[in-house]
Image: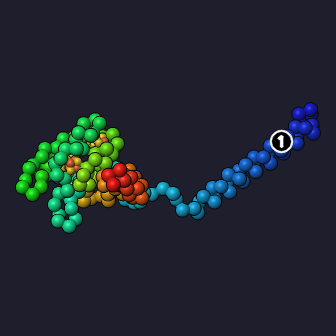
């Protein structure tokens, strides 16, 4: 009799009410989300648009006007690369030089972008894609043809060597003032 007294009975109904309330709230959330647009996409069938400044895998480029390779084989990217994953051989020609061979070990790349920053001809760029996953490391040893093919396949990132260097240069009025100051002592 003591167990069915006033307090145990009210506790039972209070707990039942709490349980029904909790189930009702959970069902409400489920129903609201049932008709929402999903935030996920069916990758890789549906790729997400990348932001302009996304920097992914590396590639070599062609000059769109002449169709010539932009790389002049100067090896600056090879010298600057911290993990030394770029190897270039220069091919000397009368009008301009080319890269005879160009290899990049992408599996050891740090994606620091230094090679892009130093390239005088915007020949090496980063792409708006990371879509190069593989279970075989040999697939990530990229030669010149593969690097050019990647450059044609994916959209380049906003950043090129010339743009990045322009960003680091002082603004034009400051440059003009500096020139004026430099001339004054001579006059
Ligand atoms: S991004 Fe950095 S680590 Fe990768 S190839 Fe370029 S310089 Fe080397
Ligand atoms: S990619 Fe650029 S920095 Fe590297 S060898 Fe070619 S021209 Fe020189």
Q: Residue at x 71, y 50 (%)?
A: 23
Give percent across and percent down for residue 122: 26, 55
Q: Which is more toward the observer, 94 or 8?
A: 94
Q: Residue at x 22, y 65 (%)?
A: 64
Q: Most extreme residue toward the front, as rendered?
A: 187
Q: Residue at x 90, y 38 (%)?
A: 7
- Residue 31 in which image quadrant: bottom right
Q: Is residue 53 left or right of residue 84?
A: right
Q: Is the residue marked 1 within 8 Å of ligand 1, measured from its CB?
A: no
Q: Which is more toward the observer, 31 or 142?
A: 142
Visual colour scheme: rainbow
Query: Is any atom of residue 119 visible in this view?
Result: yes
Q: Is residue 55 above or below residue 136?
A: below
Quarter of the figure with the C terminus: bottom left
Q: Which is more toward the observer, 5 or 101?
A: 101
Q: Most extreme residue toward the top, as rendered?
A: 2
Q: Tell which quarter ligand 1 is in.
A: top left
Q: Is residue 3 above or below residue 61?
A: above
- Residue 41 in which image quadrant: bottom left
Give percent across and percent down for residue 24: 72, 54
Q: Is residue 137 left or right of residue 50?
A: left
């Amino acid at each position: 009799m003591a167990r069915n007294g006033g307090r145990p009975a009210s506790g039972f109904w209070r707990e039942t009410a709490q349980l029904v309330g909790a189930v009702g709230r959970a069902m409400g959330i489920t129903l609201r989300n049932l008709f929402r647009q999903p935030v996920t996409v069916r990758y890789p069938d549906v790729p997400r648009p990348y932001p302009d400044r996304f920097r992914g895998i590396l590639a070599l480029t062609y000059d769109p006007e002449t169709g010539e390779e932009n790389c002049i084989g100067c090896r600056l990217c090879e010298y600057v690369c911290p993990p030394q994953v770029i190897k270039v051989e220069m091919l000397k020609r009368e009008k301009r030089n080319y890269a005879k061979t160009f290899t990049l070990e992408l599996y050891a790349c740090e994606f620091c972008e230094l090679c892009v920053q130093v390239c005088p001809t915007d020949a090496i760029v980063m792409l708006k894609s990371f879509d190069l996953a593989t279970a075989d490391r040999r697939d990530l040893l990229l030669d010149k043809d593969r690097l050019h093919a990647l450059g044609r396949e994916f959209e380049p990132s906003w950043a090129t060597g010339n743009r990045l260097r322009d960003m680091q240069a002082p603004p034009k009025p400051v440059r003009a003032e500096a020139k004026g100051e430099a001339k004054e002592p001579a006059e």
